[in-house]
Amino acid sequence: MDVKIVLRHQNSSKASQAEEFPATNNAAVLIGRDAECNVRYDETRDDLVSHKHARIVVEKVDPLEISLNDLGSSNGTFVNKHRIYSPTRLTPGDVIQFGAGGPEIQFDLNPRPILAKATRLAETPVSMPTREAILPVAAAMPPYQPVPPGPPAQFVPPPPPMGAAPVAYGSTTVGKATVERMITQTKKEGRTQMVVVALVLLAVIGGVAAYFLTRPKPPAVVVNPVNSNPNSGKLNSAQIASASTPSVVYIEVSWSLLDVNGSRPLYQVYLTNSQPDPKNKKQTIPIAQGAGNSLPLFLQLNGKVEPVLSTDDGGGQYIPIGEEGSGSGFIVSSDGFILTNRHVGEGWNTSYEGWGVHGDKAGILLVPSGNNLQFQAISAGSFPSWVPAQAKLVIEGKISAANLHVIQDSIGFPNQVQGRNNVLNVTLADNRIRIPATVARSSDSVDVSMLKIELPTALTKVDLNDNYNTIQPGARVVVMGYPGVSPQIVQVVGSKDAFAPGTVEDTVPDPTVSDGNVGRVVRNGANNSTSDAILSTMGDYYQLAINTTGEGNSGGPVFDEDGKVIGIFTAMKSQGSTTVTFAVPIRYGMELMGVTPVK
């Protein structure tokens, strides 16, 4: 059957209409208000659309590859609310918008091909918490793998002091009035770019419904299996996987940052990348060459670089602070308590990666200088290692220097800036039903959270083993979870509700099993048994000789040879082609459970 491109109009003068075009080799669909366009918008009613705005091109037929090109439009082209600047691959379900706030169409194919779900991969050698595996929207902007760049040999790269000298992009000193004019210009151009972080529907694979409904259940995937001696009494990987799979859960999460004074969402302020040309005051030049039309704004405060947030959305130009993705966890009580990482359960309490997700190549730094402000361009590598819950600078309402204030937090009182999970769903292995979860408790010092789900039946829980004081390097361990690089299984089910006909599509989690050993035991200070005051740059971790897990495996269980959980998979460090991974000792999870107090 010949494949056709299907464009479903969501709004505008063509709302509720659908147009189809053959997906033949080198076929092109021109979109705009010009008479030559294949998809033609109304000349007066759809005035955000340029005369020749964008073009959809069939790059290849086997396998099918279709891209979207912006043709130098006045108001920009957006895919899933993110502006594109180069040819962008389209997948079924993508929403294309012509100008911020302009007409939207949904891209589809008939019939839909079988697609593998995209995920983030690390682009540079970095040290980082193992981030949640980002859903397709994040992978597309660019490919969440937007890890904050840092020195390759340091696990936690601190931001360098800013403002000591102008950066390579150049700098200038201006008065407050000039900064206000720059802000005003940004507001006037607010409609030129809208970047909104939103949940994206999971990939629909219609043609595989019958297969997934009738297929025999595949065995759990075991990576690098190591079989124990059958006479030793220890369990091998397959035995651990068979016993523990019902307890290993898949977690989907989306969170946003709020100013609790009115529960208003907080946005990262973006300014227009332009400044007066010193040679010609009637013209402007970029602050950062080749870094985009709009850049995130930072302010140097007490020697630190802090992002400037606002309770206003800047006419759609500012970007809401938040992230979305998936992680792993494991059931620790039959009544539905689950342990996972804090950066899965409460993402606002760990380092932010949104600037990398949005593809920001540079930013604007405001540095106080007497009665004036100096603004400089800073590279993405100089963005701060920033925890959203520790935000310091918020603009109340409309942006102006007078409205900018520093948040003062007091011990014993709630912070003004807090995070909120918009989505927190748990799915049991080999099941497609999402179960809403809540955060029961989170550690204030370790990357551990405890979630709670409510079901009327008893759940299968894991056994725990706090071997913190006896574990040795070389001990064999097994890690289970849902790494983002693992292919997704999607089940399509026909609706049996007469009042809601159609189909329902969801991923069916199938855990991956990775076998390895403890490469090193990393101790921290007071918990050492030695008399010396030894401090780890990370804290208490088990370093693992396992590199087949990664993003999406965050929060998964680490088992010993007896099939008991001794740790929580949490982080990875890459340098060149070498990757090591880390787990939090289970005693910190047991502390949240009230089982083992940690001093």
Image (cartoon, rainbow, N blue to C red):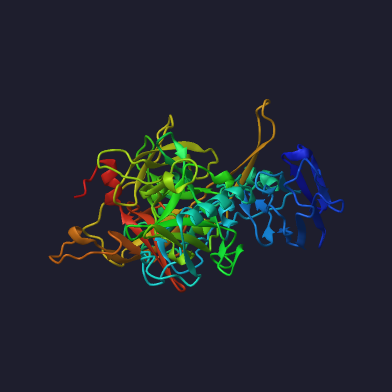
Image point 50% across, 56% down: which residue?
178
190 and 5: which is toward the camera: 190
User: Which residue is at the far top?
Assistant: 499
Q: Is residue 71 left or right of residue 198?
A: right
Front residue of 389 and 566: 389
Vertical relation: 165 (above or below) 417: below
Question: Residue 251 or 45: which is nearer the viewer?
Answer: 45
The percent coordinates of residue 89 (x first, y second) are 68, 58
Direction from residue 48 to residue 164 in the image, left or right: left
**Residue 363 x %, y %:** 49, 61
Question: Does the image show residue 23?
Answer: no
Q: Is residue 531 above or below residue 340?
A: below
* Rendering quarter of residue 125: bottom left
Report x, y in % for residue 123. 51, 66
Q: In the picture shown, does residue 481 fall above or below 403?
A: below
Rendered residue at 81%/49% (across/down): 33
Q: Nearer the viewer, residue 518 or 75?
A: 75
Q: Is residue 196 visible?
A: yes
- Total marks drawn? 0
Up/down of 364 relative to 261, above or below: below
Residue 262 image offset from top left, x and y in percent: 43, 33
User: In the drawing, does residue 86 fall left or right of residue 39?
Assistant: left
- Toward the right, the furthest residue is 35
Residue at 29 percent of width and 64 percent of height: 537
